[in-house]
């Protein structure tokens, strides 16, 4: 391809990019001795695509604006076919810029939106609606400015739609609801797309998400966009409110066109950065320096808001602000200190208790303590009555004999029944304590606290009770006058000089519970491209970019990042208490395998590039997205079919002549 001459004037140097309709080359204009970008239509395209090519040249040639990519020429080559010559922008597209400077400060987002709105202002003033505003179609030159490109599906306000089949053309995630619903378009449709771009630059994701095109379309048409301030804490309220208006489902609730959007963005920007034009030039000339300064300002703002929210007792909102601050400065010690000092959330009873006067608290505590002691005394008295009743019932067939004498005589029968009865009754309490200890253990384990004390007491108590029961029922000489009662069993647990009632109270009420501190955990900050579900030791913790921070217990953990369209990434981390770690993961999108079936000896093309002669020996691997598959038979007939390749899938495309 290098050195190939197009239309006798443009010498192709290298391929810059490829889409479903055309390939873009870097070329040298031999006549004017300058480098240009040449968009060449794929071979075998239908006449309607050639018409779109011609219209793009016509539309853009009428727009003379610094923020609109200029078109120099349009023509047709004898070999390559139709082509379009544009200015060559040395830089990157908006998505690449956002990934390089992520996380983007709101000042930079608003300035980029202002530049983009100026391009739409020029287009809308000429009656042109772009209809495909998205980060890939926005180019950022080195040193500026921003340029809106790819007017290939633009529509003129006074002209019928070019898509005679009624199909909707564009990128679904950036389409306004009315375009998806009825196919209608207006300048407000471009304003909606700008709102999606601004939301994505701030939050790292588009406002509507769905598994598949159908769910995404339903979400756009039936649900309001989430609040940008909630999704991306730290976003100034004026910018969040403007983005919400741009994303309104009713087109009448949005800024009417590019000119109105420019004015509203200027109103948002002036209090922050002054004159937008000057701030924009300074940003493009020193992007990293500007972003670093704005990040520091944003960090200090979030730190102040988090501190104020903590002081007001709003712990959850404070944590969100402080986590957003950590995204700007991972591991910032002042933020970690505030997070560690975050108070535990108080329940309704605790808040009511704190509100009572000290005298009232003393009276209530006294009443509760008296009730507890009275209940324990009544319970002990009733247990002795029940033991006596059981003994009387068991020995009713024989003359009444003291249970101690029957036990010493070694006789079996009713006295053993008494002992067995008491054993069953006595076991009720230890098992209840064990169950209570188990409940305490589960609660403490969930919060990360240790429960060894509870488990140890329960185990010792059960062992002591089992020993006393075995001694009383074996028939061996014993000085005990009666089988062990519930009081005896409890008293024989740990060695303690307290009374049985005090032992019960101590076991059931004085269990030490330690609340874990923030320094007991490690903090892991995660960022992925594209989104991913994050698993820790096999359990899902949520999805990025909404999930930004994980709290991990000290030790070894297996972290897995999963996206069904990408190759999974796994990592084993050994974390220490109080450690602050961060991970940025780029997942590789899987290729789709496409088996292409075409008439024998046909030349097979994918996106205009020949991949072989039918029958092909193996499936063709394609990137995720739209592609055009075509074949040219020996008679010169062209067969074509559009394909939406899904990453990781296997698809068969059959190209055959219509009967």
Image: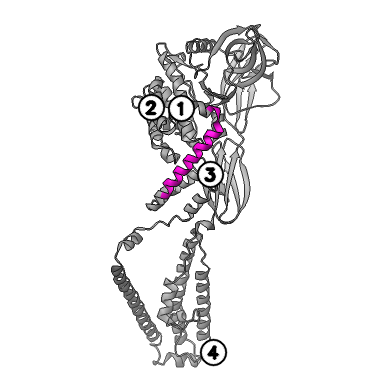
In this orientation, does residue 200 appear? no
Residue on which the image places disc 1: 113
Disc count in the image?
4
The range drawn in magenta is 284-307
- Which one is earlier in the sequence, the residue at label 2 or at label 3? 2
Residue on which the image places disc 4: 476
Q: Which quadrant holds residue 121?
A: top left
Instruction: Give x and y (percent) for residue 378.
Output: 33, 79
Q: Residue at x 48, y 36 (%)?
A: 203
Instruction: Give x and y (percent) for residue 416.
Output: 47, 85
- Which one is earlier in the sequence, the residue at label 1 or at label 3? 1
Cα–Cα span, label 1 and label 3: 25 Å
Task: Tell me the crowding category of disc 1: few under 14, some 14 to 19, or many 20 or more residues within 10 angstroms, Cα based.
Answer: many
- Relative height, residue 594 to residue 579 (above, below): above
Residue on which the image places disc 3: 329
Whether the magenta-drawn stretch holds residue 481 is answered as no
Mark 1: which secondary structure?
helix
- Relative height, residue 87 to residue 526 (above, below): above
Q: Which mark is residue 264?
A: 2
Task: State the quadrant of the N terminus.
Answer: top right
């Amino acid at each position: 391809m290098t050195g190939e001459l197009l239309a006798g004037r443009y010498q192709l140097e290298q391929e810059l990019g490829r889409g479903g309709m055309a390939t873009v080359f870097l070329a040298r204009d031999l006549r004017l001795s300058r480098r240009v970008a040449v968009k060449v239509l794929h071979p075998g395209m239908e006449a309607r695509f050639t018409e779109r090519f011609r219209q793009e040249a016509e539309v853009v040639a009428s727009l003379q604006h610094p923020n609109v990519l200029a078109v120099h020429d349009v023509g047709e080559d004898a070999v390559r076919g139709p082509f379009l010559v544009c200015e060559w922008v040395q830089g990157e597209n908006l998505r690449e810029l956002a990934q390089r400077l992520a996380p983007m400060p709101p000042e930079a987002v608003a300035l980029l939106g202002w530049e983009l709105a100026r391009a739409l202002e020029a287009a809308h003033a000429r009656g042109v609606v772009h209809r495909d505003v998205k980060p890939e179609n926005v180019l950022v030159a080195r040193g500026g400015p921003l340029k809106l490109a790819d007017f290939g599906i633009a529509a003129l306000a006074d002209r019928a739609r070019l898509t005679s089949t009624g199909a909707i053309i564009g990128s679904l995630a950036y389409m306004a609801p009315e375009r998806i619903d009825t196919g209608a378009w207006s300048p407000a449709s471009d304003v909606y797309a700008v709102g999606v771009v601004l939301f994505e630059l701030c939050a790292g994701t588009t406002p509507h998400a769905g598994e598949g095109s159908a769910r995404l379309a339903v979400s756009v048409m039936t649900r309001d966009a989430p609040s940008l301030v909630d999704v991306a804490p730290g976003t100034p309220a004026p910018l969040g409110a403007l983005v919400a208006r741009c994303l309104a489902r009713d087109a009448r609730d949005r800024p009417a066109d590019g000119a109105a959007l420019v004015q509203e963005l200027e109103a948002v920007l002036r209090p922050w950065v002054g004159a937008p034009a000057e701030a924009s030039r300074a940003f493009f000339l020193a992007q990293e320096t500007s972003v670093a300064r704005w990040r520091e300002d944003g960090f200090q703002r979030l730190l102040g808001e988090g501190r104020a929210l903590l002081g007001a007792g709003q712990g959850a909102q404070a944590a969100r602000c402080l986590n957003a601050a950590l995204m700007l400065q991972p591991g910032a010690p002042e933020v970690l200190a505030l997070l560690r000092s975050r108070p535990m959330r108080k329940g309704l009873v605790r808040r009511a208790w704190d509100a009572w006067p000290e005298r009232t608290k003393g009276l209530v505590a006294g009443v509760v303590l008296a009730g507890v002691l009275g209940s324990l005394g009544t319970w002990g008295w009733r247990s002795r009555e029940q033991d006596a009743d059981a003994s009387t019932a068991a020995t009713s067939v024989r003359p009444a004999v003291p249970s101690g004498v029957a036990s010493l005589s070694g006789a079996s029968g009713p006295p053993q029944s008494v002992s067995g009865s008491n054993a069953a009754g006595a076991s009720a309490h230890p098992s209840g304590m064990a169950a209570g200890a188990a409940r305490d253990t589960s609660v403490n384990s969930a919060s990360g606290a240790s429960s060894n004390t509870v488990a140890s007491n329960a185990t010792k108590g059960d062992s002591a009770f089992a020993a006393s029961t075995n001694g009383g029922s074996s028939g061996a000489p014993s000085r005990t006058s009666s089988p062990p009662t519930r009081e005896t069993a409890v008293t024989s647990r740990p060695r303690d000089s307290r009374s049985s009632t005090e032992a019960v109270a101590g076991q059931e009420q004085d269990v030490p519970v330690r609340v874990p501190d923030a320094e007991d955990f490690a903090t892991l900050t995660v960022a992925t491209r594209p989104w991913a579900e994050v698993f820790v030791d096999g359990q899902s913790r949520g999805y990025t970019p909404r999930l930004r921070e994980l709290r991990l217990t000290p030790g070894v953990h297996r972290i897995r990042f999963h996206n069904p369209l990408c190759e999974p990434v796994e990592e084993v981390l050994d974390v220490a208490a109080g450690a602050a770690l961060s991970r940025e993961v780029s997942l590789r999108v899987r290729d789709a395998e496409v088996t292409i079936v075409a008439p024998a000896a046909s030349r097979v093309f994918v996106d205009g590039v020949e991949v072989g002669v039918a029958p092909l020996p193996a499936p063709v691997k394609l990137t995720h997205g739209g592609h055009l598959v075509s074949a040219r038979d020996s008679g010169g007939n062209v067969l074509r079919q559009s394909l939406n390749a899904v990453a990781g899938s296997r698809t068969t495309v059959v190209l055959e002549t219509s009967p």
